Amino acid sequence: MSNPAQRANKLFVQTFGTLADTLYFAPGRVNLIGEHTDYNDGFVLPAAINFHTIIAIKRREDSQFRAVSDAFPGEMKEWTFGEEGNRPESPEWADYLKGFSSAMAISGLATKGMDLAIVSNVPLGAGLSSSAALEIAFGTAINDANQIQLSPLAIAQLAQRGENHYVGCACGIMDQMISALGQQDHALLIDCLDLDSEAVSIPENLSLIIINSNVKRGLVESEYNLRREQCEQVAAHFQLDSLRHLELADLEAAKDQLSDANYRRAKHVITENRRTQNAAWALESGNISQLSTLMAESHISMRDDFEITVPEIDFLVEIVSSVIGEKGGVRMTGGGFGGCVVALVDHELTDAVVEIVEQQYLDKTGIEATIYLCSASDGAKRLDN
Ligand code: ADP
Ligand code: MG
């Protein structure tokens, strides 16, 4: 049985011995452009993808939650609303759910409990944000089943708070926002300063391809924190709260007063913000050659100025770009030091992209890549059971 909705219903019945009331759905995501700009109050341009998490639920009259997931067979997790306790030392899967309910309780919101069966085809830990898909499916379920009337943005904010404070992951708001607010065939231009967002249509002739380098990511957290610090240092130098309102000309004028690394970090953020807005306009107007240029420049900026790519990722971008030319864009996506490459390419070139990766990547690196052929999908919603 491959249909995830049927699998969620079945897992629910097998676990709890009764039928579920309702199913909720939330997608994973990919960021098309705008890397390391979120925590600098800048712009990002993610799309929700057709890999998703589905939760079958039944409301309870008490405050208990009981959850199972097909990703962790045989593990039933239980907790009481408002009694999630302190942040666990080494977080496990149910802590993404407890983080959400705990964030609700801390915000003064109330809810009854639920029994939950979770089924997902978002690969865990592959950079497609299975964690946000899980949190947002859960948040949407609690909100809808209890008629709490939170907006999708409010659900995303609670999910981020849960992941930051309870799970202990210092993520931005992008993953949760796109999982909650995605629209089919659209990307979402998010202004991380005021969380304003705008749907941007993706031209019909483009395929969305994600290639996981499967490079084992090391040093991610320490390097991520270091980049954040360097950005903050430059903002502080200019007595600004963030790099959002720093002009490139002012950065250039102060180049001698900054370390070379800090100068290049800030240059990436300032130029990436501009590229992200321009890429949204290029997509909206179907200007693929401009999109191609902007994604190429974004990759070079991440490689040379922000220094977050690795040779395997640079190689993937190089070979994909050699077959797509100006008929699509390709760049690393995600925090860096491994992870995935995203390509938006004319449908007719999809096979050529898959072929060149299969022919050359393993030979060159000794690692097998995983390729996901995606489409931009809707954000979280209730499904008809
Ligand atoms: P990513 O979000 O990039 O996939 P993370 O490390 O942020 O990677 O989140 C992965 C973790 O989220 C998993 O290890 C697991 O704890 C939790 N998780 C995600 N999806 C599920 C799921 N369907 N069932 C249970 N836990 C999940
Ligand atoms: Mg995650």
Image (cartoon, rainbow, N blue to C red):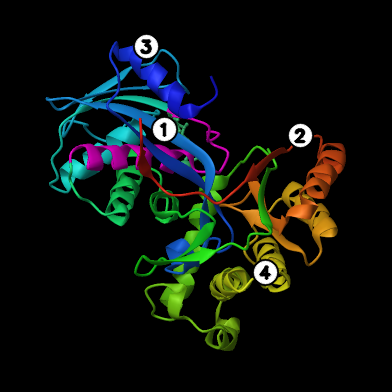
* Identity of the residue drawn at 51% across and 27% down: 3
Within 10 angstroms of label 1, few (less than 14), some, or many (20 or more) residues? many
Judged from this view, the residue extending furthest toward the front is: 384
The span from disc 3 to disc 4 (Cα, nearest Å) is 48 Å
Give the secondary structure at mark 3. Answer: helix
The span from disc 2 to disc 4 (Cα, nearest Å) is 28 Å
Of mark 3 and mark 2, the one earlier in the sequence is 3
The span from disc 2 to disc 1 (Cα, nearest Å) is 29 Å
Say which amino acid is labelled 4.
Leu
- Please tell me which residue lies in front, 178 or 237: 178
Say which amino acid is labelled 3.
Gln
- Give the residue number, with chain letter if any, for mark 2: 368
- Give the residue number, with chain letter if any, for mark 1: 54
Highlighted magenta segment, given as a residue range: 119-146
Q: In this view, does 308 lie to the left or right of 79?
A: right
Tell me if residue 69 comes above or below residue 136 in the rendering. above
Tell me if residue 360 comes above or below residue 85 in the rendering. below
Of mark 2 and mark 4, the one earlier in the sequence is 4
Q: For the residue with label 3, is its CB less than 8 Å from the closest atom of ligand 1?
A: no
Say which amino acid is labelled 1.
Ile
The span from disc 1 to disc 4 (Cα, nearest Å) is 33 Å
Of mark 1 and mark 4, the one earlier in the sequence is 1
- Give the residue number, with chain letter if any, for mark 3: 14
The span from disc 1 to disc 3 (Cα, nearest Å) is 16 Å
Asked if marks 3 and 4 touch (Cβ < 8 Å), the reply is no
